[in-house]
Image: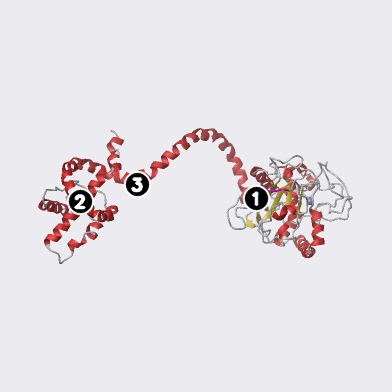
Amino acid sequence: MRRSCGTMDVHYRLLRTVPQYAEARAASENHATRAAMTGVIGRTGCTRIPVVVHVVHHTAVENISDAQINSQIDVLNHDYRRTNADVGTVPAAFAGLTGDSRVEFQLATTDPAGNPTNGITRTSTAATSFSDDDRVKSAATGGHDAWPADRYLNIWVCRLGGGLLGYAQFPGGPAATDGVVILHSAFGTSGTAAAPFNLGRTATHEVGHWLNLRHIWGDDGTGCSGDDFVADTPNQGGPNYGVPTFPHISCSNGPNGDMFMNYMDYVDDAAMVMFSAGQVVRMQAALDGLRSSIGSSIPCDGGIKKLEPDIKKIEPDIKKREPDIKKIEPDIKKREPDIKKIEPDVKKREPDIKKREPDIKKIEPDVKKREPDIKKIEPDIKKREPDIKKFEPDIGPIKQDPEIPPIGPGPVEIGGAVQHLEGGGYTYEQQAYPGYEQGYGGYEGGGQGQFEERLQRIEAALAQLSHFIQQSQRPDVRKAPLRKERKPK
Ligand SMILES: [Zn+2]
C-alpha cells in the first residue's frame, strides 16, 4: 500500500470555489518568502497548540481509543521537536539539515464554550466512509463541526475511502473546514494503526501541510520544475514510496539525491524521520502569519523535552515499587469508609470529651442522688429550654473543681448554690459563658427588687445545672470511653 494524501486536491478545489482563498495563499507565500530571506521569525520560543480530535465512527473499530489518540499526540510532539528516536537514521549528508520545529501539541483542556474537556469528540455516523470532500467536518453531512480554527487544531479521524491516508487544509482556507483528516488505521501507534502507517507519521505529514508545508517534490508529477518553496530540500522528481535506499537520485540532485526521509515525502512511516531547517522557517512563518492567533508561547527548554530525561530516570523505580503499592491497595480501600465515617466525629468530640471526662465521672453519683430534686424543677427547665439552647454553644469546658452546688428543697438552699457559683467554686468559665450575662441580664439591671433578682439568679443557676446534667446524660458522652480505659497503664 502506497501513501496517498489529498491535500493538493483540496487546495485546487478551494482555489476554484473559495474566492478569497487564492489571495490568502498569495499573501501567505509572500510572508513565507520574506521570512526565508530575512530569517526574521516572530515566535522565538516554542508554541504549544491545543488539539481537538474528532473521532467519527461507523463501526466500533473506527471508534479508536483514547490511548491510540494519545499515542498520536506523543508522535507529533517528538517529530515536531526533533526528539523522535529515529532522527539518527538521517544520512550524514542531510543530518546537519534536520530542524526542531519548536511546536508542541496538547489535547485541548477547555472546549469552545469554556468547559473542561479531554480534547476528544466522538460521533457515531451513518456514513460508511469519507473522502477528501470535507463531509466529515460537518454534523450536517455525518461528521462533526470544527472547533474554532483560530484556537484549535482540528483533527478528524474516520474511515477514508480510495486508499486515502489523510488530507489537510493549507492556511488561508475557510475556518469551518480548517484542520486535518486522518484515516483511523493510520493514526497513532496502537489500536487500529496498521503497518506500514502505524508510526503516526501521516498526522505529522498532514499537520506539516496545515503549517503551510508543500510536498517535498513540488507537486509537478515527476517533473523537475515543481517547487516546495524551501531552499534546503533538494529538487526532486516525484514522490518516493516505501522504504527507499540512500541515495535516491532524481533531477540531477546527486550525489545525495532526494531527501526522501523527510516527513513531506510519500515514504512509509518508518522511513520519514525529519523536517529540514528551511521547512521549520516556513512553518514558523505560518505561525507568525495566517496562524498567528493559535497556540501559546512556551519556553523550548521547558515542557515535554525537559521533563523526558527525568521521567525516564524514575520510571524503573516506580516499576519496582508497583508490587508493593498493589499489595496494600486493597487494605487501604477496605478501611476507607470506616475512617471517613468516624473522622468528623472523632475530631469534634476529642477535646470536649477529654476535658470533661474526669468531671463527669466525679459528679455522676451526685447527679443520681439529686434526681428527685431535678425532677421537681424539670417543668421549669422545660419552659426555659429555648433560652438554654441559645447559649449552649457558648458553654465552655469545666475549669476546675467540679463540685455540684447543693440543691435543697427550698429557695434558700438554691440561693446558697448561686452564691457558691458566684464564689468561683462552681466552675463554668464566665468568659466562655456570655449567655449568663446576656440571656439573664435582667437581674443585673436596676429597678428590680431583691427577691426578683435573686429568683433570676436561681433560675440562671438552674439553667446551668440542667444543661450540665443534659451534657452528662448525652448518650455519646456517657458511652464515650474514658481516657484511662483507652490508654491502660
Ligand atoms: Zn501531503
Q: Secondary structure at mark 3?
A: helix
Residue depicted at 71% across the width and 55% down the height = 140
Amino acid type, label 2: Pro
Q: Tell me if I can see residue 169 in this picture.
A: yes
The quadrant of the image that shows the N terminus is top right
Q: Residues within 10 Å of mark 2 (few under 14, many from 20)?
A: few
Asked if residue 338 is positioned above or below residue 47 in the image, the reply reads above
Q: Residues within 10 Å of mark 1 (few under 14, many from 20)?
A: few
Q: CA distance from mark 2 to mark 1?
A: 69 Å
Q: Going by the image, does 338 lie left or right of 201? A: left
Q: Which residues are magenta?
A: 119-126
Upstream in the sequence, badge 2 or badge 1?
A: 1
Please say whether residue 430 is one of the residues in the magenta stretch.
Answer: no
Depth check, front residue: 455 or 103: 455
Q: Going by the image, does 274 lie left or right of 387? A: right
Residue 121 - label: 1
Amino acid type, label 3: Lys
Residue that mark 3 sits on? 348
Residue 162 location, x and y as percent? Answer: 81, 46
Amino acid type, label 1: Thr
